[in-house]
Amino acid sequence: MQESLTNVIKHAAPARCVVRVDRTDDAMEIEVTDDGRRAPAGHPPGHGLVGMRERVAVYGGEFTAGPLAGRGFRVHARLPLEGVPA
């Protein structure tokens, strides 16, 4: 999810960014949101989101990313804690 913060700086700055990390009994959830501008139309997509999605999938997690209504962007990952000591 560090890549999400890099993306805020590279693509949304100046922007405010919020990072939320929550642990439930069975998962760790990480969310990064910003209120920055969107990339201009025709901006080529990078490999950051693809890489994050692949890394989360390796651990059996769920990954979503996309623009928010109006302005901003959200990246969310949920990683199962199965087999991880409490």
Image (cartoon, rainbow, N blue to C red):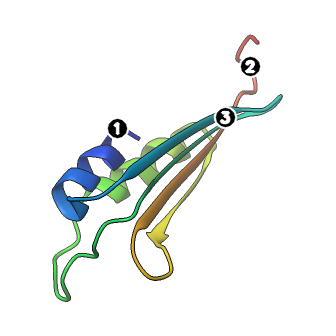
- Residue 80: percent from the left, percent from the top? 70, 35
Q: Residues within 10 Å of mark 1 (few under 14, many from 20)?
A: few
At x 67% / y 34%, what residue is drawn? Answer: 22
Q: Residues within 10 Å of mark 2 (few under 14, many from 20)?
A: few
Image quadrant where one finds the C terminus = top right
Apparent side of residue 21 relative to residue 83 in the rendered image (left or right): left
Query: Closest to the observer: 59 or 18?
Result: 18
- Of the numbered discs 1 and 3, the one sitting upstream in the chain is 1
At x 20% / y 63%, what residue is drawn? Answer: 11
Could you tell me the amino acid type at mark 3? Answer: Asp
Judging by the rendered image, the residue that carries numbered circle 3 is 22
- Residue 39: percent from the left, percent from the top? 22, 76
Q: Real-space Cα distance between discs 1 and 2?
A: 24 Å
Could you tell me the amino acid type at mark 1? Answer: Gln
Judging by the rendered image, the residue that carries numbered circle 1 is 2
Q: Nearer the viewer, mark 1 or mark 2?
A: 1
Q: In this rendering, is residue 27 above or below 64?
A: above
Secondary structure under tag 1 reads helix
At x 78% / y 32%, what residue is drawn? Answer: 24
- Residue 70: percent from the left, percent from the top? 44, 82
Image quadrant where one finds the N terminus = top left
At x 75% / y 27%, what residue is drawn? Answer: 82
- Of the numbered discs 3 and 2, the one sitting upstream in the chain is 3
Apparent side of residue 44 relative to residue 67 in the rendered image (left or right): left
Q: Tag on residue 83?
A: 2
Could you tell me the amino acid type at mark 2? Answer: Gly
Q: In this rendering, is residue 66 above or below 26?
A: below
Query: Closest to the observer: 54 or 76?
Result: 76
